[in-house]
Amino acid sequence: MDLAGKRLFLLDLDGTIYLEDSLLPGAADFLSYVRSHGGAVRYLTNNSSRGVDAGMEKMTRLGIPAEREEFLTAVEASVHYLRTCRPAGEAYFAVGTDSFRRQLRQAGFDIRETPDEDVAAVLVGFDTELTYQKVEDACRLLCRGADFLATNPDLACPTLYGFMPDCGSICQMLINATGRQSRYIGKPDPTMIALALEQTGCARSEALMVGDRLYTDIACGVNAGVDTALVLTGEATAGDAAVSPTPPTAIYRDMAALLAAIKEARR
């Protein structure tokens, strides 16, 4: 892998740049170095529980300057998918946070909060406000034949104490209950990377996908045809990578180690 030639860094957030409200080792220095040397960053996050404004506010709170254009979220990928791959005017039942539903409505979609007869699809996100009523209403719709869509397959979201259920775990509960299978829109689908390449004008050879999860972050890079770097600050271990069907191009202890490797490659 030609680290010296990388100028677009596609970065996961949870477990890669930070854990909850704590920056991970080397993250701030890495971002400062990339920007000061003419590189570009795009934050590719499957976390659909909060919007871009909240993401920018969090980065600012952590001392990291951030621009709106740098964020590509599973919500944006979902909006792109619904606009390009679904019929116009459909109604959706969203299992997600108030922020998730608000973002979808602002994008022009008909989002219902009850299992109405004309709902075409259930759309599941990372719901930190999940209730049993939402689960039951989703089951009603899925058993009735509504399509089953989801923002991302992540089973767990990293926290300071360990992990908490993510969108994939919520979907697995619905799968177990209804026998239906979900169509995932976010990582590992390569849509977010394709959007980032289009926005920046970078070639695939100039991009590097960096993340802590093999089956979403690294698989997304593999699916998009870009080099990948696994950091060991979140879910995956080096042992996991050795047996993964989508192994990373390289493995680093953390963002500090990746930064050191880039500096060495550019000497």
Image (cartoon, rainbow, N blue to C red):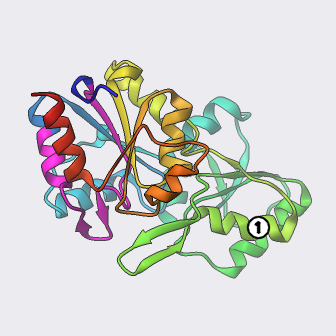
Q: Which residues are magenta?
A: 6-33
Left or right of 10? Residue 153 is right
Check residue 115 for magenta coloring. no
Q: Residue at x 56, y 45 (%)?
A: 186
Camera-side residue of 145 and 189: 189
Nearer-the-camera pick, 111 or 136: 136
Could you tell me the amino acid type at mark 1? Leu
Q: Is residue 262 visible?
A: yes
Which quarter of the image is occupied by the N terminus?
top left
Quadrant in the rendering for residue 62: bottom left
| Local SS, label 1 | helix
**Residue at left 25%, top 22%?**
5
Instruction: Tell me where residue 157 appears, x and y as whole percent.
Output: 48, 67
According to the picture, the residue beneath numbered tag 1 turns out to be 174
Q: Which residue is pictured at 70% across the width and 50% down the height?
A: 149
- Left or right of 176? Residue 6 is left
Q: Quadrant of residue 39?
A: top left
